[in-house]
Image (cartoon, rainbow, N blue to C red):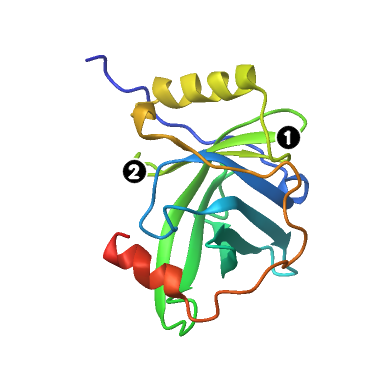
Amino acid sequence: MAAKKEMKAVKGLDLQRYMGRWYEIASFPSRNQPKDGVNTRATYTLRDDGTVNVVNETWSGGKRSSIEGYAYKADPASDEAKLKVKFYVPPFLPIFPVVGDYWVLYIDDDYQYALIGQPSRNSLWILSRKPHLDDEIYNQLIEKARDVGYDVGKLHKTSQSETPPEGEEGPKDTKGVWWIKSIMGK
């Protein structure tokens, strides 16, 4: 097996341009998301203190589930897009902080699609500004992930509607059932 290329994060990421809504096109399955989740997306908003408010949403069983947290630069002096993301879980009783790496491994010049990973190579996301991504671009992002040592066979495409829900449509999962199910591996 060939030696893994060093994983590098994007340099000089324009956080302001990165803000807004991103749709999950594909990801490694995670115990923190329902297996039947659809229309999964993230919305990023820059805060006054330079951190980023993060809202992750998914629809499961017709109900909207979400978790809110924030992201910050791992090393404020670096120009690399290596962020830390902090959530408090479970969402319905947020007491336990969970911190993860969020590295922007690739972003196109127009900030329309991105490849996000972690140095552990246990998590991978392909994000797009639109709910659907051109196959050619998708395949290019898969190659970029493979080049830095990801097992891209674990990627799971996320189902996105032709007309994604707007705002906070649909009944909300207020009990955090999806989170409990995720811990149980359901």
Pick the quarter of the image with the N terminus: top left
The x, y position of residue 46, in whole percent, is 73, 61
Instruction: Name which residue lies at 52% across and 38% down.
Output: 26
Q: Is residue 113 above or below residue 45?
A: above
Element carrying mark 1: loop
Task: Tell me if 78 is positioned left or right of 183 in this view.
Answer: right
Element carrying mark 2: loop
Q: Which mark is residue 59?
A: none
Q: Which mark is residue 122?
A: 2
The x, y position of residue 143, in whole percent, is 48, 19
Q: Earlier in the sequence, mark 1 or mark 2?
A: 1
Crowding at dot 1, Cα within 10 Å, few <14 / some 14-19 / many 20+, comes out as some
Q: Is residue 177 above or below residue 76?
A: below
Instruction: Name which residue lies at 56% across and 51% down.
Output: 38
The x, y position of residue 35, in whole percent, is 42, 53
The amino acid type, in three-letter code, at marker 2 is Asn
Task: Tell me if 107 is positioned left or right of 166 in this view.
Answer: left
| Image marks 1 and 2: residues in contact by CB distance under 8 Å | no
Q: How many marks?
A: 2
Instruction: Name which residue lies at 72% across and 68% down.
Output: 168
Residue tagged by mark 1?
Answer: 112
In terms of image quadrants, where is residue 104?
top right
Task: Tell me if 165 is positioned left or right of 87 in this view.
Answer: right
The x, y position of residue 53, in whole percent, is 65, 65
